[in-house]
C-alpha cells in the first residue's frame, strides 16, 4: 500500500504557550501559525492567552494586542483596518477573511489563525501573493483607449453602464476567494483564479474600454478560465460579499456568444 508522509520540516508542531498575567476572567486563547525562514525549524502553533476586555472587537485588534504587548515578532500584513486595502487577509477559524472585519465575538472557543491556504509562507501569517499579482498584471487592469483624443476631454459613461460595474469595482484583491478555490490550489500557475477573473470581467464590461475583444481572447484560454468547475467556494468566502463565480460564468457566456 502506498504510504504518504509529509516532508520532515513541514509537520506543524506545538509551539510556545503565553499565559495571561493580568488575572482577568475574560480570557480567549488564540492559536497562531508561526514559521520563520530565518530558523531551520518546523512550523508551530503558538498559543496566546488574551484579555479581551481590553481589546477592540476585531481579530486584527487581538493580533495587534499580541504584537504590542506579548510577542513583537508575530508577523502579519495590515494597513487600513477598515476592509479597504485587502492586506490583512488570512484564515481565521477555518475561513479566509479580512482580520480587520472579522469580529472575534462571533467565534466560540479558541481562535485559530493561519495564513491564506495553499500559498508559500513568507513568515508567520504572511503568504506569498507574487503569482497572483503576476496574473493580475497579465490582464492589464487599466482602461485601454486606442487613441487618446485630447487630454482635456473627459471619458464619460452613462449611468446604466456605470451600474454594470457594481459588484465588481468593490473588489480589493484580498485573495480570500482565489485561495479558497480548489481549482486554484491544483492549477494556480495556469488557472487565473476567481479574483483575477472577476477583475478581467470588470474591465471587459467597462463601456469606456476599447479592447474588449482582445481582452476576451486573452482570458478565453482553456486553463486560464475553464479551470473553474463552479464549486462556488470563492463566492462563499468573499469578505466584501461579491460573487466571482457569477463573473466567471458571465465571461464564459460572453465567449460562447461572441
Ligand atoms: S472577489 Fe472578494 S474575495 Fe476575491 S479578491 Fe475580490 S474582494 Fe477579495
Ligand atoms: S466557482 Fe470556480 S473560481 Fe469559484 S471556487 Fe469554484 S472553481 Fe474556484
Ligand atoms: S487592514 Fe486593510 S483590509 Fe484589513
Image (spheres, rainbow, N blue to C red):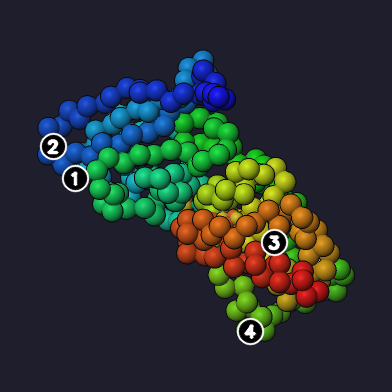
CB under 8 Å between discs 4 and 1: no
Please state which of residues 11 and 175 is positioned toward the viewer in this rendering. 11
- The residue at 76%/59% (across/down) is 219
What is the distance, in whole Å, between disc 1 and disc 3 at their CAs?
Answer: 44 Å
- The residue at 65%/40% (across/down) is 130
Residue 24's disc is 2
Q: Mark 3 or mark 1, which is nearer the start of the sequence?
A: 1
Q: Nearer the viewer, mark 3 or mark 2?
A: 3
What is the distance, in whole Å, between disc 3 and disc 2 at their CAs?
Answer: 50 Å
Q: Mark 4 or mark 3, which is nearer the start of the sequence?
A: 4
What is the distance, in whole Å, between disc 4 and disc 1 at their CAs?
Answer: 48 Å
Residue corresponding to mark 1: 53
Q: Position of residue 183 (x, y in %)?
A: 62, 49
Q: Mark 1 or mark 4, which is nearer the start of the sequence?
A: 1
- The residue at 66%/70% (across/down) is 250
Q: Mark 2 or mark 3, which is nearer the start of the sequence?
A: 2
Q: Secondary structure at mark 2?
A: loop
Q: Is residue 193 shown left or right of residue 47?
A: right
Q: Residue furthest top?
A: 40
Residue corresponding to mark 4: 160
Residue corresponding to mark 3: 200
What is the distance, in whole Å, between disc 3 and disc 4 at their CAs?
Answer: 20 Å
Q: Nearer the viewer, mark 3 or mark 4?
A: 3
Q: Mark 2 or mark 4, which is nearer the start of the sequence?
A: 2
What is the distance, in whole Å, between disc 4 and disc 2 at their CAs?
Answer: 56 Å
Amino acid at each position: 500500500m502506498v504510504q504518504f508522509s509529509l516532508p520532515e520540516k513541514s509537520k506543524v508542531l506545538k509551539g510556545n504557550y503565553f499565559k495571561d498575567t493580568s488575572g482577568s476572567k475574560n480570557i480567549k486563547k488564540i492559536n497562531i501559525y508561526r514559521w520563520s525562514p530565518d530558523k531551520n525549524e518546523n512550523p508551530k502553533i503558538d498559543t496566546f492567552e488574551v484579555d479581551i476586555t481590553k481589546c477592540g472587537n476585531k481579530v486584527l485588534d487581538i493580533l495587534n494586542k499580541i504584537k504590542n504587548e506579548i510577542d513583537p515578532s508575530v508577523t502579519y500584513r495590515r494597513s487600513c483596518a477598515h476592509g479597504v486595502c485587502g492586506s490583512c487577509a488570512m484564515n481565521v477559524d477555518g475561513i479566509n477573511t479580512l482580520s480587520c472585519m472579522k469580529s472575534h465575538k462571533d467565534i466560540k472557543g479558541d481562535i485559530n489563525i493561519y495564513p491564506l491556504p495553499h500559498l508559500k509562507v513568507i513568515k508567520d501569517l504572511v503568504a506569498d501573493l507574487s503569482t497572483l499579482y503576476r496574473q493580475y498584471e497579465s490582464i492589464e487592469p487599466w482602461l485601454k483607449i486606442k487613441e487618446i483624443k485630447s487630454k482635456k476631454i473627459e471619458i464619460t459613461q452613462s449611468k446604466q453602464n456605470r451600474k454594470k460595474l457594481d459588484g465588481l469595482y468593490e473588489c480589493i484583491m484580498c485573495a480570500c476567494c482565489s485561495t479558497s478555490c480548489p481549482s486554484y490550489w491544483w492549477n494556480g500557475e495556469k488557472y487565473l483564479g476567481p479574483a483575477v477573473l472577476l477583475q478581467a470581467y470588470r474591465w471587459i464590461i467597462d463601456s469606456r474600454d476599447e479592447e474588449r475583444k482582445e481582452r476576451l481572447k486573452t482570458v478565453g484560454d482553456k486553463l486560464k478560465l475553464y479551470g473553474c468547475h463552479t464549486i462556488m467556494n470563492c463566492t462563499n468566502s468573499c469578505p466584501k460579499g461579491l460573487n466571482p463565480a457569477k463573473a466567471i460564468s458571465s465571461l464564459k457566456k460572453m465567449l460562447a456568444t461572441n
